[in-house]
């Protein structure tokens, strides 16, 4: 189940609890930084970084480079909405051909037509998770600035039909999941009916705390206090320091920067430029080692992590 994978990646292994460490098991690629929503809980719409699509030649190069280093899992998303990337199915297929054990995708689901769902699952996608964060059409539009609640619900249900068809015809099963953000103490009750309408289409659903996205979304729309750092999921929250992201998962921006933060909406957390250096050179660069040292000491004052934690 997906929660077991989430809990595994958010736990820092002894082998990775240092400043110079082995390659992470999991890496996420920002195939595109573009997004079709403007969610209040996400800083992407603030356009702190330039937006663009990852060059496919770069996708292939880094995928082939990382696999022999020990990277086993590839997320085909990061800051943007990867359903907008023209060659998403090609990227998934390539990752599976190279030998990655687990290829996963999180999406807002708005652009997931049945044809696109078939293409990415048939390409070998192992996990498709929907970010599902509203109780109804009105609250969805308030949260995202887009009227697409009914479309997303329909797309989730259709994804299950497509998944089961592929499973029956080829034996390949793509896990279908959803996560929801716990805006406040009333959100679970508000979303009970909405979640009830899609649960039969999912293999699992879980809740996430409201992250502050490196401080950029703190207090947005009058929500309760945001969680410092990235403590994982509700029910299995991790300590904010040291932040597991610096040690357990790589994140590559659309233009080739290896960055140390899952909310890296600007360059303060960049480890190195993979257009100019190898993955391991960037993964254990001076910038990476410095942030890890401060996190291990549980004192990130004066670093890029300060505003996220405090």
Image: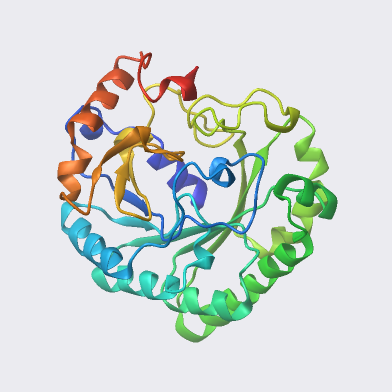
Judged left or right of residue 170, residue 192 is: right
Residue depicted at 61% across the width and 59% down the height: 36
Measured as percent of width and height from the top left, residue 167 is found at: 52, 78
Name which quarter of the figure residue 7 lies in. top left
Closer to the camera, 4 or 82? 82
How does the figure colour the protein chain or chains?
A: rainbow
Measured as percent of width and height from the top left, residue 104 is found at: 44, 59
Measured as percent of width and height from the top left, residue 192 is found at: 80, 47
Judged left or right of residue 277, residue 17 is: right
Question: How many numbered marks, from 0 up?
Answer: 0
Residue depicted at 16% across the width and 49% down the height: 277
Name which quarter of the figure residue 87 lies in. bottom left
Residue depicted at 78% across the width and 64% down the height: 150
Closer to the camera, 122 or 273? 273
Measured as percent of width and height from the top left, residue 108 is found at: 61, 57
Above/below status of 96 relative to 54: below
């Amino acid at each position: 189940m997906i929660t077991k994978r989430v809990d595994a990646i958010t736990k820092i292994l002894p082998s990775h609890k240092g400043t110079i460490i082995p390659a992470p098991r999991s890496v996420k690629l920002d195939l595109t930084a573009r997004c079709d929503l403007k969610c209040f809980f996400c800083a992407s719409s603030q356009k702190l970084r330039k937006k663009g699509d990852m060059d496919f030649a770069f996708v292939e190069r880094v995928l082939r480079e990382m696999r022999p280093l020990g990277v086993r899992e590839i997320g085909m998303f990061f800051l943007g909405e990867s359903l907008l990337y023209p060659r998403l199915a090609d990227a998934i297929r390539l990752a599976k051909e190279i030998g990655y054990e687990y290829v996963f995708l999180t999406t807002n689901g708005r652009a997931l037509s049945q044809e696109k769902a078939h293409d990415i699952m048939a390409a070998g996608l192992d996990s498709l998770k929907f970010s599902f964060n509203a109780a109804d059409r009105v609250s969805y539009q308030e949260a995202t600035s887009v009227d697409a609640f009914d479309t997303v619900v329909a797309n989730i249900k259709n994804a299950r039909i497509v998944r089961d068809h592929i499973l029956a015809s080829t034996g390949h099963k793509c896990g279908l999941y959803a996560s929801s953000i716990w805006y406040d103490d009333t959100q679970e009750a508000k979303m009970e009916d909405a979640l009830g309408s899609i649960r039969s289409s999912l293999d699992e659903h879980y809740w996430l705390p409201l992250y502050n996205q490196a401080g950029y979304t703190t207090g947005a729309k009058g929500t309760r206090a945001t969680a410092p750092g990235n403590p994982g999921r509700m029910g299995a929250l991790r300590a904010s320091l040291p932040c597991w992201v610096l040690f357990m998962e790589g994140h590559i921006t659309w233009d080739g920067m290896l960055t140390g933060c899952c909310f890296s909406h600007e360059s303060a957390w960049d480890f190195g430029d993979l257009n100019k250096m190898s993955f391991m050179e960037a993964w254990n660069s001076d910038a990476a080692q410095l942030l890890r040292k401060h996190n291990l000491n549980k004192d990130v004052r004066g670093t890029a992590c300060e505003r996220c934690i405090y």
